[in-house]
Amino acid sequence: MTSETGIGARVKRKEDQRFLTGTGRYVDDLPLARATYAYFLRSPHAHARIKSIDVSAAKASPGVVEIFTGKDVADAKVGGLICGWVVKDKHGQPHKSPPHPVMAVDTVRYVGDSVAMIIANSYDEAKDAAEAIKIDYEVLPANVDLAKALAAGAPQIHAEAPGNLIYDWELGVKADVDAAFAKAAHVTKLDLVNNRLIPNAMEPRAAAAEYDKGTGQYTLWSTSQNPHVLRLILSAFVLGIPEHKLRVVAPDVGGGFGSKIFCYADETMVCWAASRVGRPIKWTAERSESFQTDCHGRDHVTHAELALDKDGKFLALRVETIANMGAYLSTFSTAVPTYLYATLLAGQYTTPLIYANVKAALTNTAPVDAYRGAGRPEATFVIESIVSKAAMEMKIDPAELRRKNFIPSTAFPYQTPVALQYDSGNYPPIIDEAIKIADYKGFEGRRAEAKSRGKLRGIGFSSYIEACGLGPSQVIGQLGGGVGQWESAQIKFNPTGNVQVLTGSHSHGQGHETTFAQLVSDRLGVPIDQIEVVHGDTATTPFGMGTYGSRSLAVGGSAIMKAADKVIAKGKRIAAHLMEASVADVVFEGGTFKVAGTDKAVPLGAAVFAAYVPHNYPLAELEPGMDENAFYDPSNFVYPAGTQICEVEVDPDTGEVEIVSFTAVDDFGNIINPMIVEGQVHGGIVQGVGQALMENAVYDEATGQLVSGSYMDYTMPRADDVPSFKVGYKVTPCPHNPLGVKGCGEAGAIAAPAAVMNAVHDALAPVGVGHVPMPATPLNVWQAIHGAAK
Amino acid sequence: MYDFTYHRPKTLADAVNLLKGKDEARPMSGGMTLIPTLKQRLARPSDVIDLGGLKELAGIKVEGNNVVIGGMTRHADVASSADVKAAIPALAHLAGHIGDPQVRNRGTIGGSVANNDPAADYPAAVLALGATVTTNTGKHAADGFFKGLFETALGEGELITSISFPKVEKAAYMKFPNPASRYAMVGVFVAKSASGVRVAVTGAGSCVFRVKAMEDALAKDFSSAAIKDIKIPADGLNSDIHGSAEYRAHLVGVMARRAVDAANK
């Protein structure tokens, strides 16, 4: 039974009180006595050699405390930033690993690469001083176009990566796939560009640091999604500060979407410089810096081919992708277009043979790394686009073609040909439910009605799967990942019976303070207002891996459940002592220990009190106190899946696309807080719609400048761009974690681009349009229609 | 933002005097363009003369056949004015769709017209309605006022005190917003009065302009059918990542037809 605050309840978010009343504490809010302010001077060129830097005039500028250049940093032997995932190419060689200095020494490689750090008594003084720095650049040929990055004669970005190639990687046996294609009754071919995105978290990246000379202790406040991982990287690879002398705090963080997973140059510099200037340093990115220097997302060029038999059964899939890495390899960049992409190319289907070849390339652009979905949106876009195109070519209903190829519910656990083993799922009821909610049967009537108003109406499907809940550490290790992927939890009772739940995951908008409190309330029977969830501080929480890859509930929540089980186990022993009963006879129900068949009962709170005031307590066999921790390493990924159906109307006169209906039916396993899950689904869909119709990071080919460098030119989706979403759920519990949960954080963004683009293509097919590039902006749609009419 | 000296005069005369004495002084009405420009360090005025205290420049009156709007009148006040809605509803509609609520409650008609941003909405209304721009030194007819990119007939130290819009028989404004900024990528204001038809286009070129071929056709037959075959040349129109010159030229036709249909409703 669901209580009002337990598992399954729509509990209002505990954290929203402070977020909605302006009382959150973000990095920039920190009051630090004697603080200085940092400004980073950045390269205006996409590629240039630094012939000289003269900071003498700038150092004399009012208010300046210190100025550091790349040479200062190099002379101090600061390590470079690392890429933490080794991908081995098709010859078994590790990926090319060009250096990534935290500040450019002699060469800048993208617009935004930092060349000097100016520290002053105020931010404005730092900026004033930056204008007095004289840099003599020798501008070098640059390339910002992924499609040209690997061509002969392309500007060479790093000597360590000849031809700008980071790796040429493959998955699957090409000869087997080619043989299947030779026997196919039909082959569908598709060329796609997965447009480059800029994350745009509401709070820009920020860092503040102070150094305590007396203890040698550094404290770094950072807008991080994973403070322990950031500390580990800074300690072990970059700054050499021992872990026990570096405290990383990620307080309230206003959104990340992946972009705040990584170890960035700016926060590294702020931390390093704090001990050198002997005063705290604060830095908050301006929005235009965020556009230029946050890691971007997506950016693939792909050719895909799907082989089908005469009945529409998938025989094989062949995918060639070039993935943009930007100018340097970011923390997890290499894994995104390989192990988070190609391994998902089976989708929800029984395609028996799959071959993927991925080439990662350097360009003179900001680094590209994980962004909401990370690889899985790119995979879903390829699969779901080509399946819909095949349906159109073979004149098979797109829902029917999907159903015909779904992995049957009896086949789980299902081993795909691309390494993953899906643990559970049941796909046909999902699409059936989506079809019902979306009134698919009535679509042709709506299309005809729209036509009478001069509008072109179309419908599009996207049946996605994702592997998330990262992840089983040993599998991650076998694939080249440099870290474990377990999560930690600690349940710490106070003598008065209220609880601190410490988690190694991090909340930057996901609502962990509520969801995790629900778990503990449900399991231990403690009222939810007596539970405080604590995260984000390496000094107070157990080592944890942070939040990304829809892992917090499936992995972090499971760790909390393990810790709760330990609390119950210890509580039983205390209660048995108090009730003078055998431990084996004690049961725990509704927050109370009982002896079955008697009226003996000890509430958990009483057992906790006894543990802290152990006057009547089995001290000989049991430690006092109630403070249990647990680590949980999952045995597999989790595999949320679902179907989205999007309906659009295109105005052929202007090229505008309006989303008139959007349905999402998901299987997230068991749901803890349906309200929070809906929020995640809605937000994810809007980000997917943003990619499909609006967002596009554009660099100017001639100058290498980021043209879409502000909200004047980068189109973010707004509330009036989307309709009310229709959502539904089907539940197949995850069989391998204690909560039976999957993950919901990325699903919307993973599935939506294909659903929207398939709808656009369906709408435009009657006027002869074969392909519209993503995003389907009014200009792109109008040009496609206009081109087709010529 | 660089340091500057801030002034907030209470009278027009004081404002004009403050501007006169200084080479690098900039008047600020709503600040919707100036403030972001200052924040990005793209402008370095010695003095900023905030016109927000000039109560005499704010307000809307009907004088005979004209609606007279003070230079410091906020977009939100024009949008919600019963007088404007009754006399020239298309003008109230235009004002109600500038920017977002924050912009509409700060931005002013005088500031917008004096700035002459190529993607601003008001210049299309001023030009299509044949408005008269009154300043501290004289009057300007709409034709000839908008000179080019961010350039007007205003002289040094000249401030817009009011703009007078003659009532017309029919009018409508149709805007195709830039998807990112929601400024006008193409905005067409169509107005029909006893003296003829005027069609003004904003957003498409470097400066608001009239389309004579459409005006002539609409003078004979004020219907969207009358202009459906008129092609706007793409030469000289703006081209960027959101719209090629050809696309903007096409949208001028679409928005003009929609404006005529709306005016006829």
Image: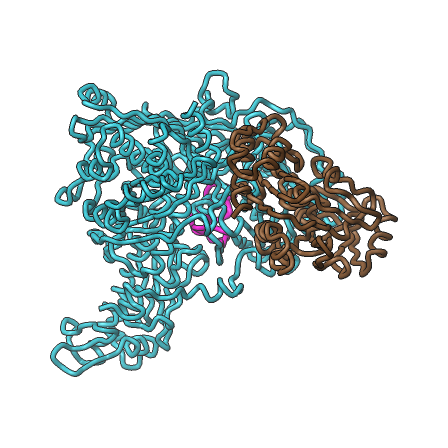
Q: Residue furthest bottom?
A: A599
Q: Say which of B78 and A582 sits in front.
A: B78
Q: Say which of B57 and A421 sits in front.
A: B57
Can residue A638 be seen in this snapshot? no
Residue B211's spot in the image, x, y percent?
A: 63, 33
Considering the image in quadrants, where does the C terminus of chain A appear?
A: top left
Residue A349 in the image: above or below residue B29 = above
The chain coloured cyan is A
What is the basis of the colouring in this image? by chain
> Which range of residues does the magenta coloring cover?
A223-248
- Relative to A547, A132 lies left or right: right
Residue A303's spot in the image, x, y percent?
A: 34, 26
Q: How many marks?
A: 0
- Relative to A253, A375 lies left or right: left
- Residue A187 included in the magenta stretch of the image: no
Q: Say which of B178 and B218 sits in front.
A: B218
The quadrant where residue B189 appears: top right
Q: Residue at x 76, y 57 (%)?
A: B57
Can residue A598 be seen in this snapshot? yes
Q: Residue at x 66, y 40 (%)?
A: B196
Considering the image in quadrants, where does the N terminus of chain A appear?
A: bottom left
- Relative to A694, B29 lies left or right: right
- Residue A237 included in the magenta stretch of the image: yes
Residue A684's spot in the image, x, y percent?
A: 38, 48
The quadrant where residue A556 appears: bottom left
Q: Residue furthest top?
A: A152
Q: Colour of chain B?
A: brown
Residue B145's spot in the image, x, y percent?
A: 74, 40
